[in-house]
Image (cartoon, rainbow, N blue to C red):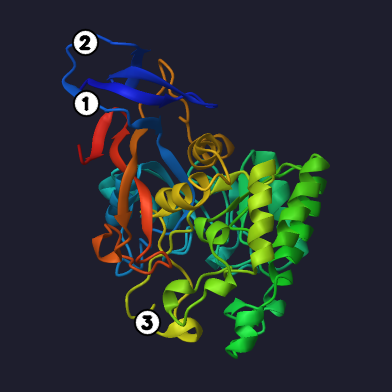
Amino acid sequence: MSILVKNAYVFKGDGFIKNDVLIDGGRIAAIGVSISNSADTVIDAQDKYLIPAFADVHVHLREPGFSYKETIYCGTRAGAKAGYTALCTMPNVNPVPDSVEGINAQLDIIKRDAVIDVFPFASITKGRKGEGELVDFDALKNLAVGFSDDGCGVQGENDMRLAMQKCAKLGKIISAHCEVNELLNGGYIHDGEYAKAQNHKGICSESEWAQIERDCRLAEETGCQYHVCHISTKESVEIIRQAKARGVKVTCETAPHYLTLCDEDLQEDGRFKMNPPLRAKEDRQALLEGVLDGTIDVIATDHAPHSEEEKAKGLAGSAMGIVGLETAFPVLYTKLVKTGVITLEKLINMMSVKPREIFSLGGGRIEVGEAADLALLDLNTKWTVNPDEFVSKGRATPFAGDTVCSQNTLTIFKGEIVYATL
């Protein structure tokens, strides 16, 4: 199937050029002005923005084991709707992908049901417990995009050292959820002014940054490629900034909610509960500074669907996690790009280009010969976030009711149209 996209503003890394793009055989065949070709499908982009499709390196698709929360089919369709063609899935599933058999249970469903690329993480520890026996890294290296105990921090320093030594030898990445269990003290929102005023149990910032500090030291010692999940505190930003300055092979991500909300925005509603929690205003500002100076490499969603019942128990009783695939770009474009905080090019690099580079997912460039994984954005559309219209099974989002700008209108995956509203 050949596709000709005409009159698009085409992303070129540091800017946009108005061009036509011809896709044939799953790849970009030509880029130029007024391409004349009898393509099977011709799409007039009408000045929309053609970008490398987004890649999310931190999602929870809940299968196998928890399909009442989400399925690989629904989650990948939600991703395609939003302009994603690559999702990296965390190991919070059953069976845990801590063995060849465990990860194959997930890969079988991916092969059957996914409408875009899905790259699963294997766990670091057996059972994804954050402690105890480590997995057989050699056996899993060719099946997993990397190793993570997401949802649990690896508690023992020597366990993490051994895991990093093994991953460094294999050339695999560790993507770490950083959390010191003994510092949690039953907390479930940020240990800040809102928690004190409303008599909630707080999670201290040190529970995150103390483990990041330890792991950056271990990554420096072992030479492991180390990626930090969903950072949320000002101390985390500074620790990673300093580690990068020393030459440590560390990268990191944050999520849209940490860049646009803080604990002053909390409501007594489960849709505001996630882990790590929304932090203080000064933490959000430090994260924005980390985005601007390159300390933070990637914006990932931490898309974490739960059932309506699991999210209906307020801040204290609800499950941790919100959905994010279908709101991520519009929220960030509206709240950060249109307000002049960051550029459109910067945002696309952090959502499309850098995640693909860091995790070796392929793509990220619109050039002749490259695979045709593309999204077409209408930046002028305004819409109101209505969770009832989500493709994802999850409905919990702190952005419900917000008016946002921009909408994806077309997703092309390996040269095939997997979503279109044109």
* Circle 2: residue type: Asn
Q: At which x and y percent is residue 50?
A: 37, 30
Q: Are marks 1 and 3 in contact (CB under 8 Å)?
A: no
The residue tagged 1 is 43
Task: Measure how far apart labels 3 and 2 are at the Cα level.
Answer: 54 Å
Indicate which disc, 3 or 2, sits on the residue closer to the N terminus.
2
Indicate which disc, 1 or 3, sits on the residue closer to the N terminus.
1
In this rendering, the label closer to the viewer, 1 or 3: 1
Tell me, yes or no, if residue 84 can be seen here.
yes
Q: At which x and y percent is residue 77?
A: 28, 50
Point out the image quarter for the C terminus. Answer: top left
Task: Measure how far apart labels 1 and 2 are at the Cα level.
Answer: 12 Å
Question: What residue appears at the point 73 percent right and 48 percent down from the top-left corner?
Answer: 165
Which circle marks residue 37 in the picture?
2
Pointer 3 local density, CA inside 10 Å: few below 14, some 14–19, many at least 20: some
Indicate which disc, 1 or 2, sits on the residue closer to the N terminus.
2
Report the number of discs.
3
Front-lying residue, 308 or 181: 308
Residue reaching furthest top? 36
**Residue 71 vs residue 349: left or right?**
left
Local secondary structure at mark 1: strand
Q: State whether residue 194 is above or below residue 68.
A: below
Q: At which x and y percent is residue 325?
A: 39, 53
Which circle marks residue 312 in the picture?
3
